[in-house]
Amino acid sequence: MPHATALVHVMDAEVRGRGVDGAIAALAERQHGVVAREQLVDLGLGRGAIGHRLACGRLHPVHRGVYAVGHRVLSQEGRWMAAVLAAGAGAVLSHRSAAALWRIRLSARRRVEVTVSRTVASRRAIEVHVAALAPDEVTAVRGIPVTTPPRTLLDLAAVLRAPQLERALNEADVLRLGSTVSLDDLLVRHRRRQGTRALRRLVQQGSIGAAITRSELEARFLAVLDEAGMSRPQVNLWLRCGRGWIEGDCVWRRERVVAELDGFASHGTRAAFERDRERDRALQAAGWRVIRVTWRQLHDDPGTLAADLRELLSRR
Protein backbone atom coordinates (compact mmCIF):
# COMPACT_ATOMS: atom_id res chain seq x y z
CA MET A 1 0.00 0.00 0.00
CA PRO A 2 1.36 3.49 -0.80
CA HIS A 3 2.72 5.46 2.14
CA ALA A 4 0.47 8.33 3.26
CA THR A 5 3.24 10.93 2.77
CA ALA A 6 3.86 9.70 -0.78
CA LEU A 7 0.14 9.95 -1.51
CA VAL A 8 0.11 13.57 -0.28
CA HIS A 9 3.04 14.39 -2.60
CA VAL A 10 1.19 12.80 -5.53
CA MET A 11 -1.95 14.81 -4.74
CA ASP A 12 0.09 18.03 -4.40
CA ALA A 13 1.55 17.47 -7.87
CA GLU A 14 -1.90 16.82 -9.31
CA VAL A 15 -3.30 19.98 -7.73
CA ARG A 16 -0.53 22.03 -9.34
CA GLY A 17 -0.89 20.34 -12.72
CA ARG A 18 -4.65 19.82 -13.07
CA GLY A 19 -6.37 22.06 -10.53
CA VAL A 20 -8.31 20.94 -7.50
CA ASP A 21 -11.21 19.31 -9.34
CA GLY A 22 -8.83 17.50 -11.66
CA ALA A 23 -6.92 16.22 -8.63
CA ILE A 24 -10.18 15.05 -7.02
CA ALA A 25 -11.15 13.22 -10.20
CA ALA A 26 -7.73 11.56 -10.41
CA LEU A 27 -7.92 10.47 -6.77
CA ALA A 28 -11.43 9.09 -7.24
CA GLU A 29 -10.29 7.18 -10.32
CA ARG A 30 -7.62 5.42 -8.24
CA GLN A 31 -10.16 4.68 -5.48
CA HIS A 32 -13.06 3.29 -7.49
CA GLY A 33 -15.00 6.56 -7.53
CA VAL A 34 -14.83 7.58 -3.85
CA VAL A 35 -12.80 10.00 -1.72
CA ALA A 36 -12.54 10.75 2.00
CA ARG A 37 -13.04 14.15 3.58
CA GLU A 38 -9.51 14.08 5.00
CA GLN A 39 -8.16 13.61 1.48
CA LEU A 40 -10.14 16.59 0.24
CA VAL A 41 -8.71 18.67 3.07
CA ASP A 42 -5.21 17.54 2.06
CA LEU A 43 -6.00 18.85 -1.43
CA GLY A 44 -6.71 22.26 0.09
CA LEU A 45 -10.52 22.22 0.31
CA GLY A 46 -12.16 23.76 3.35
CA ARG A 47 -15.62 23.19 4.78
CA GLY A 48 -17.18 25.71 2.43
CA ALA A 49 -15.58 24.30 -0.70
CA ILE A 50 -16.65 20.77 0.22
CA GLY A 51 -20.18 22.01 1.02
CA HIS A 52 -20.37 23.79 -2.33
CA ARG A 53 -19.44 20.62 -4.23
CA LEU A 54 -22.04 18.68 -2.26
CA ALA A 55 -24.71 21.27 -3.03
CA CYS A 56 -24.00 21.32 -6.77
CA GLY A 57 -23.79 17.52 -7.10
CA ARG A 58 -20.09 17.08 -7.67
CA LEU A 59 -19.86 15.08 -4.45
CA HIS A 60 -22.45 12.63 -3.06
CA PRO A 61 -22.36 11.30 0.54
CA VAL A 62 -21.76 7.56 0.87
CA HIS A 63 -20.77 7.36 4.54
CA ARG A 64 -19.99 10.05 7.06
CA GLY A 65 -16.87 11.70 5.69
CA VAL A 66 -16.77 9.66 2.46
CA TYR A 67 -18.14 10.83 -0.89
CA ALA A 68 -18.75 9.47 -4.36
CA VAL A 69 -17.38 11.77 -7.04
CA GLY A 70 -19.63 12.83 -9.93
CA HIS A 71 -22.46 10.34 -9.46
CA ARG A 72 -24.06 8.09 -6.85
CA VAL A 73 -23.67 4.75 -8.64
CA LEU A 74 -20.77 2.73 -7.24
CA SER A 75 -19.32 -0.60 -8.27
CA GLN A 76 -18.81 -3.33 -5.70
CA GLU A 77 -15.17 -2.24 -5.50
CA GLY A 78 -16.35 1.30 -4.85
CA ARG A 79 -18.57 0.18 -1.98
CA TRP A 80 -15.70 -1.81 -0.47
CA MET A 81 -13.31 1.12 -0.81
CA ALA A 82 -15.83 3.55 0.68
CA ALA A 83 -16.21 1.35 3.77
CA VAL A 84 -12.45 1.12 4.23
CA LEU A 85 -12.11 4.92 3.95
CA ALA A 86 -15.00 5.46 6.36
CA ALA A 87 -13.32 3.28 9.01
CA GLY A 88 -10.27 5.52 8.97
CA ALA A 89 -6.51 5.18 8.82
CA GLY A 90 -5.21 1.61 8.81
CA ALA A 91 -8.57 0.01 8.03
CA VAL A 92 -8.66 -2.95 5.65
CA LEU A 93 -11.39 -5.01 4.04
CA SER A 94 -11.75 -8.30 5.95
CA HIS A 95 -13.79 -11.41 6.77
CA ARG A 96 -16.62 -12.19 4.32
CA SER A 97 -16.07 -9.01 2.31
CA ALA A 98 -12.39 -9.84 1.84
CA ALA A 99 -13.36 -13.38 0.86
CA ALA A 100 -15.66 -11.96 -1.81
CA LEU A 101 -12.87 -9.73 -3.14
CA TRP A 102 -10.50 -12.71 -3.32
CA ARG A 103 -13.32 -14.82 -4.85
CA ILE A 104 -12.89 -17.32 -2.05
CA ARG A 105 -16.55 -17.09 -1.12
CA LEU A 106 -19.45 -15.11 -2.54
CA SER A 107 -21.41 -13.02 -0.08
CA ALA A 108 -24.85 -11.48 -0.32
CA ARG A 109 -24.40 -9.50 2.91
CA ARG A 110 -25.16 -5.81 2.52
CA ARG A 111 -22.83 -4.78 5.34
CA VAL A 112 -19.19 -4.46 4.39
CA GLU A 113 -16.75 -5.94 6.91
CA VAL A 114 -13.53 -4.13 7.77
CA THR A 115 -10.85 -4.56 10.42
CA VAL A 116 -9.10 -1.76 12.30
CA SER A 117 -6.59 -1.79 15.14
CA ARG A 118 -8.55 0.59 17.38
CA THR A 119 -12.12 0.77 18.62
CA VAL A 120 -14.39 2.19 15.94
CA ALA A 121 -18.17 1.97 16.06
CA SER A 122 -19.91 -0.13 13.45
CA ARG A 123 -22.41 1.60 11.18
CA ARG A 124 -25.57 0.50 9.46
CA ALA A 125 -23.66 -0.45 6.32
CA ILE A 126 -20.27 -1.27 7.87
CA GLU A 127 -19.39 -4.01 10.36
CA VAL A 128 -16.15 -3.20 12.17
CA HIS A 129 -13.83 -5.84 13.65
CA VAL A 130 -11.03 -4.75 15.95
CA ALA A 131 -7.71 -6.59 15.66
CA ALA A 132 -4.02 -5.80 15.41
CA LEU A 133 -2.90 -7.00 12.00
CA ALA A 134 0.75 -7.70 11.27
CA PRO A 135 2.20 -6.13 8.09
CA ASP A 136 2.38 -9.55 6.41
CA GLU A 137 -1.35 -10.07 7.03
CA VAL A 138 -2.48 -7.16 4.85
CA THR A 139 -2.05 -6.25 1.19
CA ALA A 140 -3.92 -4.35 -1.51
CA VAL A 141 -5.95 -5.62 -4.46
CA ARG A 142 -6.88 -3.16 -7.18
CA GLY A 143 -5.98 -0.42 -4.74
CA ILE A 144 -8.26 -1.71 -1.95
CA PRO A 145 -6.51 -2.49 1.37
CA VAL A 146 -7.47 -6.05 2.30
CA THR A 147 -6.40 -8.94 4.48
CA THR A 148 -4.22 -11.54 2.74
CA PRO A 149 -5.86 -14.82 1.69
CA PRO A 150 -4.46 -16.77 4.71
CA ARG A 151 -5.56 -14.05 7.14
CA THR A 152 -8.95 -13.91 5.42
CA LEU A 153 -9.36 -17.66 5.94
CA LEU A 154 -8.35 -17.26 9.58
CA ASP A 155 -11.02 -14.57 10.02
CA LEU A 156 -13.62 -16.69 8.24
CA ALA A 157 -12.95 -19.50 10.71
CA ALA A 158 -14.40 -17.30 13.45
CA VAL A 159 -17.66 -16.53 11.63
CA LEU A 160 -18.49 -19.53 9.41
CA ARG A 161 -19.75 -23.02 10.10
CA ALA A 162 -17.38 -25.89 9.34
CA PRO A 163 -18.88 -26.86 5.94
CA GLN A 164 -18.78 -23.25 4.76
CA LEU A 165 -15.22 -22.87 6.00
CA GLU A 166 -14.13 -26.04 4.21
CA ARG A 167 -15.68 -24.73 1.01
CA ALA A 168 -13.74 -21.45 1.33
CA LEU A 169 -10.51 -23.39 1.94
CA ASN A 170 -11.15 -25.46 -1.15
CA GLU A 171 -11.77 -22.41 -3.30
CA ALA A 172 -8.64 -20.63 -2.05
CA ASP A 173 -6.61 -23.72 -2.84
CA VAL A 174 -8.05 -24.10 -6.33
CA LEU A 175 -7.34 -20.43 -7.04
CA ARG A 176 -3.74 -20.95 -5.81
CA LEU A 177 -4.04 -17.99 -3.44
CA GLY A 178 -1.15 -17.43 -1.10
CA SER A 179 1.04 -14.75 0.46
CA THR A 180 4.37 -14.18 2.15
CA VAL A 181 2.98 -15.71 5.34
CA SER A 182 1.30 -19.12 5.13
CA LEU A 183 -1.90 -20.32 6.73
CA ASP A 184 0.14 -22.72 8.87
CA ASP A 185 2.19 -19.78 10.14
CA LEU A 186 -0.95 -17.87 11.09
CA LEU A 187 -2.42 -20.88 12.90
CA VAL A 188 0.70 -20.92 15.07
CA ARG A 189 0.75 -17.15 15.48
CA HIS A 190 -2.94 -16.99 16.50
CA ARG A 191 -3.34 -20.41 18.10
CA ARG A 192 -5.89 -19.21 20.66
CA ARG A 193 -8.08 -17.27 18.26
CA GLN A 194 -11.69 -18.31 17.79
CA GLY A 195 -12.10 -20.80 14.96
CA THR A 196 -8.45 -21.85 14.70
CA ARG A 197 -9.19 -25.33 16.06
CA ALA A 198 -11.72 -26.05 13.30
CA LEU A 199 -9.44 -24.53 10.68
CA ARG A 200 -6.44 -26.55 11.86
CA ARG A 201 -8.52 -29.73 11.78
CA LEU A 202 -9.52 -29.14 8.15
CA VAL A 203 -5.93 -28.45 7.14
CA GLN A 204 -4.65 -31.57 8.94
CA GLN A 205 -7.31 -33.74 7.31
CA GLY A 206 -5.75 -32.94 3.96
CA SER A 207 -9.17 -32.45 2.41
CA ILE A 208 -8.44 -29.06 0.89
CA GLY A 209 -9.44 -29.03 -2.76
CA ALA A 210 -11.78 -31.97 -2.47
CA ALA A 211 -15.03 -30.02 -2.60
CA ILE A 212 -14.57 -28.62 -6.09
CA THR A 213 -16.15 -31.49 -7.94
CA ARG A 214 -15.71 -32.63 -11.49
CA SER A 215 -19.34 -31.78 -12.19
CA GLU A 216 -18.83 -28.21 -10.98
CA LEU A 217 -15.84 -27.75 -13.27
CA GLU A 218 -17.85 -29.13 -16.18
CA ALA A 219 -20.84 -26.91 -15.41
CA ARG A 220 -18.70 -23.80 -15.29
CA PHE A 221 -16.86 -24.71 -18.49
CA LEU A 222 -20.09 -25.37 -20.38
CA ALA A 223 -21.49 -22.08 -19.10
CA VAL A 224 -18.47 -20.24 -20.51
CA LEU A 225 -19.02 -21.93 -23.87
CA ASP A 226 -22.73 -21.05 -23.83
CA GLU A 227 -21.99 -17.41 -23.00
CA ALA A 228 -19.58 -17.27 -25.95
CA GLY A 229 -22.10 -18.87 -28.31
CA MET A 230 -19.87 -21.87 -28.96
CA SER A 231 -20.84 -25.46 -29.65
CA ARG A 232 -20.92 -27.82 -26.69
CA PRO A 233 -18.57 -30.82 -26.62
CA GLN A 234 -19.38 -34.37 -25.64
CA VAL A 235 -18.62 -34.82 -21.96
CA ASN A 236 -16.72 -37.71 -20.35
CA LEU A 237 -16.26 -39.56 -23.61
CA TRP A 238 -14.03 -42.65 -23.84
CA LEU A 239 -11.49 -42.45 -26.68
CA ARG A 240 -9.43 -45.22 -28.22
CA CYS A 241 -5.72 -44.35 -27.93
CA GLY A 242 -3.12 -46.87 -29.03
CA ARG A 243 -3.69 -50.05 -27.08
CA GLY A 244 -6.00 -48.56 -24.46
CA TRP A 245 -8.87 -46.20 -23.73
CA ILE A 246 -8.79 -42.72 -22.20
CA GLU A 247 -11.78 -40.80 -20.91
CA GLY A 248 -11.71 -37.24 -22.25
CA ASP A 249 -13.39 -34.57 -20.12
CA CYS A 250 -14.79 -32.51 -23.01
CA VAL A 251 -14.44 -33.77 -26.57
CA TRP A 252 -15.14 -32.20 -29.97
CA ARG A 253 -15.01 -35.28 -32.23
CA ARG A 254 -15.03 -33.58 -35.63
CA GLU A 255 -12.34 -31.07 -34.67
CA ARG A 256 -10.42 -33.75 -32.71
CA VAL A 257 -9.98 -31.44 -29.72
CA VAL A 258 -10.03 -32.52 -26.07
CA ALA A 259 -10.33 -30.06 -23.19
CA GLU A 260 -9.12 -31.49 -19.88
CA LEU A 261 -10.55 -29.73 -16.80
CA ASP A 262 -7.97 -29.43 -14.02
CA GLY A 263 -9.21 -29.25 -10.44
CA PHE A 264 -6.40 -29.15 -7.91
CA ALA A 265 -7.89 -31.97 -5.86
CA SER A 266 -7.34 -34.47 -8.66
CA HIS A 267 -4.36 -32.92 -10.42
CA GLY A 268 -2.28 -31.31 -7.65
CA THR A 269 0.13 -34.13 -6.75
CA ARG A 270 3.35 -35.13 -8.48
CA ALA A 271 1.88 -38.52 -9.43
CA ALA A 272 -1.17 -36.84 -10.94
CA PHE A 273 1.07 -34.40 -12.82
CA GLU A 274 2.98 -37.28 -14.41
CA ARG A 275 -0.23 -39.21 -15.17
CA ASP A 276 -1.81 -36.19 -16.86
CA ARG A 277 1.22 -35.71 -19.13
CA GLU A 278 1.15 -39.38 -20.05
CA ARG A 279 -2.54 -39.06 -20.98
CA ASP A 280 -1.85 -35.95 -23.04
CA ARG A 281 0.97 -37.67 -24.91
CA ALA A 282 -1.20 -40.70 -25.72
CA LEU A 283 -4.05 -38.51 -26.96
CA GLN A 284 -1.74 -36.43 -29.14
CA ALA A 285 -0.13 -39.55 -30.57
CA ALA A 286 -3.65 -40.67 -31.56
CA GLY A 287 -4.25 -37.40 -33.41
CA TRP A 288 -6.08 -35.40 -30.75
CA ARG A 289 -5.22 -31.82 -29.77
CA VAL A 290 -5.34 -31.42 -25.99
CA ILE A 291 -5.73 -28.28 -23.90
CA ARG A 292 -5.93 -28.00 -20.14
CA VAL A 293 -8.38 -25.62 -18.47
CA THR A 294 -8.14 -24.64 -14.80
CA TRP A 295 -10.81 -23.44 -12.42
CA ARG A 296 -8.92 -20.17 -12.05
CA GLN A 297 -8.95 -19.55 -15.80
CA LEU A 298 -12.69 -20.23 -15.88
CA HIS A 299 -13.24 -17.63 -13.17
CA ASP A 300 -10.63 -14.98 -13.95
CA ASP A 301 -10.44 -14.83 -17.74
CA PRO A 302 -13.28 -16.77 -19.42
CA GLY A 303 -13.35 -14.40 -22.40
CA THR A 304 -9.73 -15.05 -23.40
CA LEU A 305 -10.18 -18.77 -22.78
CA ALA A 306 -13.23 -18.87 -25.07
CA ALA A 307 -11.43 -16.87 -27.78
CA ASP A 308 -8.41 -19.18 -27.71
CA LEU A 309 -10.62 -22.26 -27.83
CA ARG A 310 -12.66 -20.83 -30.72
CA GLU A 311 -9.43 -20.31 -32.68
CA LEU A 312 -8.28 -23.85 -31.91
CA LEU A 313 -11.59 -25.37 -33.01
CA SER A 314 -11.52 -23.42 -36.27
CA ARG A 315 -8.29 -25.12 -37.34
CA ARG A 316 -8.52 -28.45 -39.09
Image: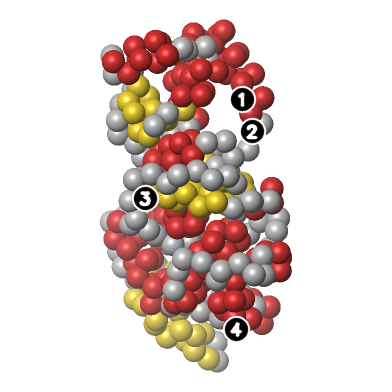
Mark nearest the camera among 4 and 3 is 3
* Circle 1 residue: 7
Sequence-wise, the earlier of marks 4 and 3 is: 3
**Residue sitting at x 61%, y 21%:** 8
Q: CA distance from mark 1 to mark 2?
A: 7 Å
Q: CA distance from mark 1 to mark 4?
A: 45 Å
Q: Amino acid at mark 2?
A: Pro
Note whether 244 is above or below 264 in the view shown. below
Sequence-wise, the earlier of marks 1 and 4 is: 1
User: As rendered, which of 32 and 291 lies closer to the eye?
Assistant: 32
Q: CA distance from mark 4 to mark 2?
A: 39 Å
Image disc number at residue 111: 3
Sequence-wise, the earlier of marks 2 and 3 is: 2
User: CB atoms at circles 3 and 1 under 8 Å apart?
Assistant: no
Task: Please tell me how crowded label 1 is: few (under 14), some (14-19), or many (20+) other residues with Cα within 10 Å.
Answer: some
Image disc number at residue 269: none
Image disc number at residue 2: 2
Q: Amino acid at mark 1?
A: Leu
Sequence-wise, the earlier of marks 1 and 2 is: 2
* Circle 4 residue: 205
Q: CA distance from mark 2 to mark 3?
A: 26 Å
Sequence-wise, the earlier of marks 4 and 2 is: 2
